Image (cartoon, rainbow, N blue to C red):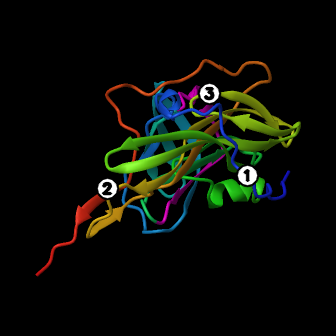
Amino acid sequence: MRYGLIGVLALGCHGGSSGDEFAASTLEKSTVLVDQELPNDVRVDWPADITVGGSEPNWTLQLDATAANVTIEVHSAAHSDLSGLGLDGATVSVQPEPFSNELSLLVTDANGDLQYLVEPVKPGPLTQEVFGLGLLAPYDDLGSVAVDGWNLGLTGAVIRTDGGDQDLLPGQPIEATIGGDTYRVVLVESFAAQRIDPANEQCTGASDRLAFEMVRVDPGTADLSPLTRSEQLDIPTATCTPYITQ
């Protein structure tokens, strides 16, 4: 089932927060690593049987694919339970984000039904393929924080579900029914970034984020425990280096 575009949303203010109370629940990056070289900026699909290893938050997906065996390592900042992805006849797809080259990951079963989706930067082609445009949009001003020379304007989000638009806060899982199927959805990071003291420098990687994960669950079984980022991990930002002048 596809959904129309969520309209332009005016950001409200969440209780006049400075952002500090939501910084801890803005999670670290979700990451997807593949054990082979991939073509630049090109989506790759593997029809495969999947064997799952590891445990939350770090998982290994071993693909017994037609062309080759592939290993994918997933760090799930949302602590998604991927133990159910041991599937036969699945399709596994990865899509690089054009600026940061971070990989999005989509897993569908033999019937083409979504089982797991991680977008480490923002909704992209994999999300659009399943849900069309407008599944997720930033919503609700949560204040701002300064991180590594960036001012991050934290936001919540709204996701379109069968029951109507549902609010998402960083690190707070929800159970949502979309297209008749039930998912545990977590907003991993959502912010707009502005350099505090712009200099003669080049910044690489994605600065703005609307990152999320969703995994298929049985109705009423999603773990809705709030998540927080480890104090040893920073909120991810783009990396900036000075231009070298000759």
Closer to viewer: mark 2 or mark 1:
1
Is residue 109 or residue 186 the one in the foreground?
186
Choose top left, top right, bottom left or bottom right for residue 171: top right
Closer to viewer: mark 1 or mark 3:
1
Question: Which residue in the protein does label 1 denote?
Answer: 10
Q: What element carries label 2?
A: strand
Question: Which residue in the protein does label 3 denote?
Answer: 172
Is residue 217 or residue 124 the one in the foreground?
124
Does residue 185 sit above or below 226 in this rendering?
Answer: below
Does residue 198 sit above or below 227 in this rendering?
Answer: below
**Does the magenta segment cover residue 97?**
yes
Residue at 63% in and 33% down: 169
Report how far apart the C-alphas of labels 3 and 2 lie in the structure. 27 Å
Q: Looking at the picture, which amino acid does disc 1 mark? A: Ala
Q: Looking at the picture, which amino acid does disc 2 mark? A: Thr
Answer few, some or many: residues within 10 Å of disc 2's Cα (few below 14, many 20 plus, some between 14 and 19): some
Q: Looking at the picture, which amino acid does disc 3 mark? A: Gln
Report how far apart the C-alphas of labels 1 and 3 lie in the structure. 22 Å
Is residue 154 or residue 41 the one in the foreground?
154
Question: Which residue in the protein does label 2 denote?
Answer: 239
Q: What stretch is highlighted in magenta?
A: 78-98
Q: Which of marks 3 and 2 is nearer the N terminus?
A: 3
Does residue 101 sit above or below 233 in this rendering?
Answer: below
Q: Position of residue 54 (x, y in %)?
A: 44, 26
Answer few, some or many: residues within 10 Å of disc 1's Cα (few below 14, many 20 plus, some between 14 and 19): few
Q: Where is residue 33 in the image (x, y as percent from the top left)?
A: 41, 47
